[in-house]
Image: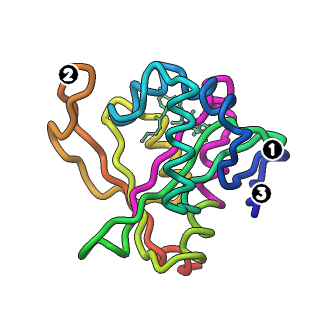
Amino acid sequence: MKLFTEIPEIGLRPLEKRDIPDLARCANNPRIAHFVRDRFPSPYTEQDAITFLELQLKEGRPEQMAITDQDRLIGMMGAIPQTDVYRLSAEFGYWVSEDYWGKGIATAAARVFTPWLFDQTDLIRVYARVFAFNPASRRVLEKSGFIYEGLCRDAVIKEGKIHDEYYYALLKKDQHED
Ligand SMILES: CC(C)(COP(=O)(O)OP(=O)(O)OC[C@H]1O[C@@H](n2cnc3c(N)ncnc32)[C@H](O)[C@@H]1OP(=O)(O)O)[C@@H](O)C(=O)NCCC(=O)NCCS
């Protein structure tokens, strides 16, 4: 299974064992870890990549995809389905290798990933939480059709500092408005 984006050679596909070295190399960057949850390892070793891949394979999560350039991993994009009364929602997350920042790749990937997700699952809502000091990620969401839903004050402690957090969401029904 492969999703193609509007950018030549940039696509999305499920993670594979052969991605482990690229995953570890691309993810091992404190400038990525700075913008995501503390559970994202930093430094990010090959063992961390193996542990992540094994977890994805064990849980059979097709919603976690490698972003690829000529079929080689250059980032990750995924959605984590929620539980209980939130079971029709999923939390959206992504990162792109720093060498590829600013080329429209995260936006192009989100634009094909979210319709695919709504098509393949029962999900009706995909939401993202963005630290207030991450304007690039806010732009990605805005350019991908996500709607700003609000600011949660003092929601995050990252590297010892407290920050606000922005909420964005895309609804399945938003996609059929055109
Ligand atoms: C956020 C991230 C995924 C963006 O990936 P990308 O492929 O570079 O994103 P795109 O090129 O599609 O879009 C980035 C947009 O942010 C803008 N941007 C970048 N830095 C910015 C800044 N400091 N202030 C404002 N806008 C900024 C770019 O100009 C671009 O917008 P434009 O097309 O209107 O010019 C990437 O920077 C990354 O992996 N960051 C670390 C992990 C992360 O933040 N993940 C998301 C957690 S919510």
- In the image, taking residue 14 as reference, residue 50 lies left or right, namely left
Tell me residue 162's x, y (percent). 18, 27
Q: Amino acid at mark 2?
A: Lys
Q: Is residue 163 above or below residue 109?
A: above
Q: Nearer the viewer, residue 116 or 73?
A: 73
Q: Is residue 147 above or below residue 76?
A: below
Q: Residue 88 shows which numbered tag?
A: none
Disc 2 + disc 1, Cβ < 8 Å: no
Residue at image coords 57%, 37%: 50
The C terminus, quarter of image: bottom right
Write down the residue under mark 3: 4
Write down the residue under mark 2: 161
Residue at image coords 40%, 65%: 81
Inter-mark Cα distance, 3 to 2:
39 Å
- In the image, taking residue 89 as reference, residue 101 lies left or right, namely right
Per the rendered image, the range of residues in magenta is 90-112
Q: Amino acid at mark 1?
A: Asp
Other residues around mark 2 within 10 Å, as few (<14) / some (14–19) / many (≥20): few
Question: Is disc 2 placed on a helix, strand or loop?
Answer: strand
Most distant residue in the left direction = 154
Foreground: disc 1 or disc 3: 1
User: Does the closest atom of ligand 1 sit within 8 Å of the Cβ of label 2?
Assistant: no
Write down the residue under mark 1: 71
Inter-mark Cα distance, 2 to 1:
38 Å
- In the image, taking residue 172 as reference, residue 166 lies left or right, namely left
User: Image quarter for residue 113?
Assistant: bottom right
Residue at image coords 41%, 33%: 40
Tell me residue 98's x, y (percent). 61, 24
**Residue 96 magenta-drawn?**
yes
Residue at image coords 59%, 77%: 119
**Residue 127 magenta-drawn?**
no
Q: Amino acid at mark 3?
A: Phe
